[in-house]
Amino acid sequence: MDAQWFSAPEYWLARELVQRGVAAIYLIAFVAAGRQFRALIGEQGMLPVPRFVARVPFRSAPSLFQLYYSDRFFAAVCWFGAAVSAGVVAGLINVVPLWAALVTWLVLWVLYQSIVNVGQRWYGFGWESLLLEAGFVAAFLGNDDIAPPLPALWLVLWLVFRVEFGAGLIKLRGDECWRDLSCLDYHHETQPMPGPLSWFFHHLPRPLHRVEVAGNHFSQLVVPFALFAPQPVGSVAGVVVIVTQLWLVASGNFAWLNWLTIILAFAALDHTAFATVLPLGDPPPLSGPPLWFAVLVLAAAALTLALSYWPVRNMIGRGQRMNASFNSLHLVNTYGAFGSIGRVRYEVVLEGTSDTLGAEPVWREYGFKGKPGDPRRMPRQWAPYHLRLDWMMWFAALSPSFAADWFRPLVNRLLRNDAATLRLLRHNPFPDAPPRYVRARLYEYHFTTWRELRRDGAWWHRELVGEYLPPVSLDRQRSSR
């Protein structure tokens, strides 16, 4: 096929960055799934996959695990997906025929779709759908056998538009602090999982927080339209998205949401934009696609156009939803984040004891890898890796009902010193024998001041709010059944 309008060889480097970047996120996602699934959704997990697929039909949650499940098979899917993803990062799809490159991308999409669709609460966040949609679109960017198809690049930009504009709209319609520019007085402190720089972001002068929010509104409500403008405007818009997303990367841990948005935004940059900062020659000579591939690209574009009705209706409607998939394949979703901002941070702290409750038991605290616990421990950077249990503990503190189906199973596993569960934690205070009792307490956390940090070496100070879960033991739980 030689139609000049269809091919965009000037975006060859953008394609390389988008495809290898999406594959890198796939790699991280598969590794995270392989390392965490046994305690979360394994056969003996808190929300087991076999129990889920027994009540949810295939059409509602299409997955390989609807056909067969075992922990060994799930692990094989994870590590095979990680291996294929690593191959794509290394350039695998550029040394195989075009049809094989397409199949490789679709294999990754099917494998991760299978995980997400049985992942239940642990996989119920927007970045899962974003990765699936990005992986599907990346398949139609081709490989080094052809020039990047322009319709496929538009699909990538349409995805970036929905991520950014949807997030901007939900803020504008949501919490009034977004409208009076005060949300960042609280957000850096109350976000789900602060990073190592979040303390410093929180202590920026309030006028700068106002500038941050105003800049966010501009980058999410105005700039996305410029992604589709002629060059060099499109490239400038892409750079604005990349820079603002890097600011979010520095200020917190949001799994791969920001990193994947950055990767996709490179699709707006042409060869000239890259050549302004990199010593690049002319674009390599690339031919047009074969007819069969062009037909598939146009079919994917037509499918996206048809499925866009629901996210567009959601964005312009009054009852906008933050993150939603309108089909079981997670194609053409709606996105958004932090429509409301908490003013106070609560944390659930889990403790165990080997003593009896009659005397004065010594309670020892379990340490999590990412979520705040020990006030003296500096917050860590984990994104784009995703700590699913740590993230969900933030929701547990906000609403016990949200954690009703998995929190007691978590406690049960701590009472047994379950190895898979303990691998999700940073510190187990009972390495030799399981505790006799486990309890949970609710604390209010605040960042310390500059003076307190220098004096005490503490990043947080916390105050006890009350009991979240009274002391429980395996014997008591058995007797209550």
Image (cartoon, rainbow, N blue to C red):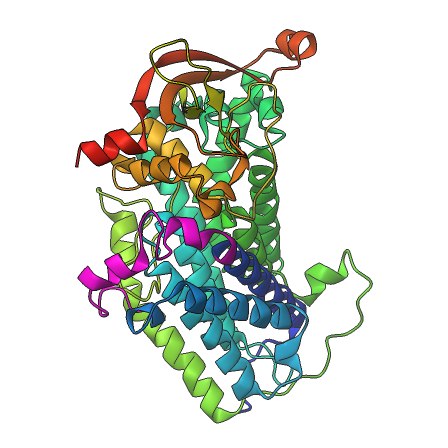
Q: How many marks?
A: 0
Give the residue drawn at x 55%, y 90%. Answer: 2
Res. 335 in view:
no
In which quadrant will I find the C terminus? top left
Residue 61 image offset from top left, x and y in percent: 27, 64
Q: Is residue 307 above or below residue 386?
A: below
Relative to residue 400, is residue 364 drawn left or right? right
Q: Is residue 152 above or below residue 421?
A: below
Residue 207 image offset from top left, x and y in percent: 55, 18
Residue 399 image offset from top left, x and y in percent: 28, 29
Is residue 59 part of the magenta span, yes or no? Answer: yes
Relative depth, front residue between 316 and 457: 457
Q: Which residues are magenta?
A: 34-63
Is residue 401 part of the magenta span, yes or no? Answer: no
Relative to residue 413, is residue 405 drawn left or right? left
Res. 280 in view:
yes
Give the residue drawn at x 41%, y 63%. Answer: 71
Relative depth, front residue between 449 and 380: 380
Give the residue drawn at x 76%, y 57%. Answer: 276
Relative depth, front residue between 213 and 126: 126
- In the figure, residue 392 lies in which quadrant? top left
Relative to residue 287, is residue 445 drawn left or right? left
Furthest residue to the right? 279
Q: Is residue 398 above or below residue 243?
A: above
- In the figure, residue 264 lies in which quadrant? bottom right
Residue 87 image offset from top left, x and y in percent: 63, 72
